Image (cartoon, grey):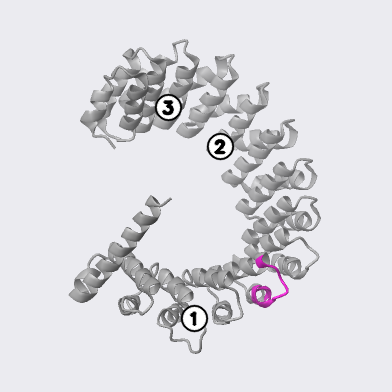
Amino acid sequence: MATFDELIQKLKSGDDAERAAAAEQLGKLHSLRVTEPLIETLRNDPSPMVREAAAQALGENGDRRALQPLLEILNENEPLLRSTALKALGVLGDPRAVDTLIRELQNSPEYRTRELAIISLGKIGDPRAVPALINALANDAIWSVREYAAQALGNFRDPRVVDALTTALLQDSGDTVRSFAAKSLGEIGDPRTVDALITPLLQDSNDTVRQYAAEALGKIGDPRAVDALIRSLRGDGSSAVSSKAAVALGKIGGSKVIDTLIQIVLDKSVLDGIRAAAIDALGKIHDPRATETLIQALNDHSEGWTIRYRALKALGTQNDPNGVDALIEALLNPKEGYSYRKSIVETIAKVRHPKALQTLLKMATDDVGGSVTGSWLRESALEALGERREPEVIPVLVQALQDQNASVRTQAAIALQKHIHAHPDIILKLPTEDRNRMGRLLQDQQREELQNELCK
């Protein structure tokens, strides 16, 4: 990227595109030095394109000296420039812009202007905007304006907002308005809205509205929603909605939820997408029954890839000793396919359990007996060890630098480099010979990558 001085010179170019690009790059510097040159460009450049770039850059730069110049743009008749200034005011986030933005929302005949004013008011988050946003949600004739109002109101924690969003959820004719009303209610998380969200979950004709209602109920986490979510999981005509219901149930938990999710997972007449969502939900529930069901799905070779893959991922999130044992057993089974075993390695790498680490260390050194680990699996283990930070990992990586297999050596060097980036003092503890060996391996790898790139 060009330096500050070089970009300032480009602002004086005779080429509009070059000046616009320079203004855009100045905004990414996030420096107080760029504010005055950008304000000068915004006010005086003859090109609307360049002024738009300057307005956007002033918002991104975050210096509140840009507020007044951006407000001045709203008095001009350049629609695109005014739109850019409205967006920049939201990015800038200065509460002093709120009154002006409210006036734009209330008085502009242009629906796009009202939308942009709403977006910026939502980003700023000043409570003075609440009445105007509620009015737009309730009364604007354009559904997209009401949609943006529903989204923006999710940023406020005000009882009036909850009431307005609930009304929109139950009464607005726009599908997207109802959808975002449900989404915002979930973000606010008020338990008083549970009954209101259950109604569209079970009755709304639009799939997306029902999905957002399920998600919102999961975020709120109130057990009163369990029965309705179970009905949705079992009986909604949309697999997407049923999947969202499963995820929501997993967040709420409880014995009834666990029993239902287990039944769904074990019922092979249910669509795989819904069963997979139920598996994900069980993975978030730390209960022996959930673990047992996930192990059963993991070991059922009559299942397709989707179910077994999601089961292994879910077991990885539980950190249950029985689940870890099941993952290790599947990993060391030479009858399992390459992709599946590699996925298990990636999962075990994230499990914070001593057995998981010991298995990776043994695989990296080919110390698991028999012909279970090919070089590709050892590479996967070394790659996983690059993400661990336990001290016993380092000697294994150093040892692998001298492996007979070139790919294993390279992967060991890459993994060791990650440890050094995280803890630079490690390199001081390595013998000079090992440091040099790692350096040569990394150089060879970079050279190979460059050659491959040039051959494309």
Q: Nearer the viewer, residue 306 or 203?
A: 306
Residue at image mark 2: 158
Tell me the distance, in whole angstroms, between the alpha carbons under discs 1 and 2.
Answer: 59 Å
| Mark 3 secondary-structure assignment | helix
Mark 1, Cα crowd under 10 Å, few <14 / some 14-19 / many 20+, is many
Residue at image mark 3: 88
First reached walking from the N terminus: tag 1 or tag 2: 2
Tell me the distance, in whole angstroms, between the alpha carbons under discs 2 and 3.
Answer: 26 Å
Q: Is residue 94 left or right of residue 108?
A: left
| Mark 1 secondary-structure assignment | loop
Mark 3, Cα crowd under 10 Å, few <14 / some 14-19 / many 20+, is many
Q: Nearer the viewer, residue 333 or 28?
A: 333
Q: Amino acid at mark 3?
A: Ala
Q: The magenta stretch spans which residues? A: 293-305
**Residue 373 placement (x, y as % from top left):** 49, 81
| Residue 391 marker | none
Q: Is residue 302 magenta?
A: yes
First reached walking from the N terminus: tag 1 or tag 3: 3
Say whether residue 422 is visible: no
Q: Is residue 248 above or below residue 287?
A: above
Q: Is residue 287 above or below residue 206?
A: below
**Residue 56 placement (x, y as % from top left):** 40, 27
Q: Quadrant of the N terminus?
A: top left
| Mark 2 secondary-structure assignment | loop
Q: Which residue extends farthest front?
A: 455
Image quadrant assignment for residue 423: bottom left
Q: Amino acid at mark 1?
A: Thr
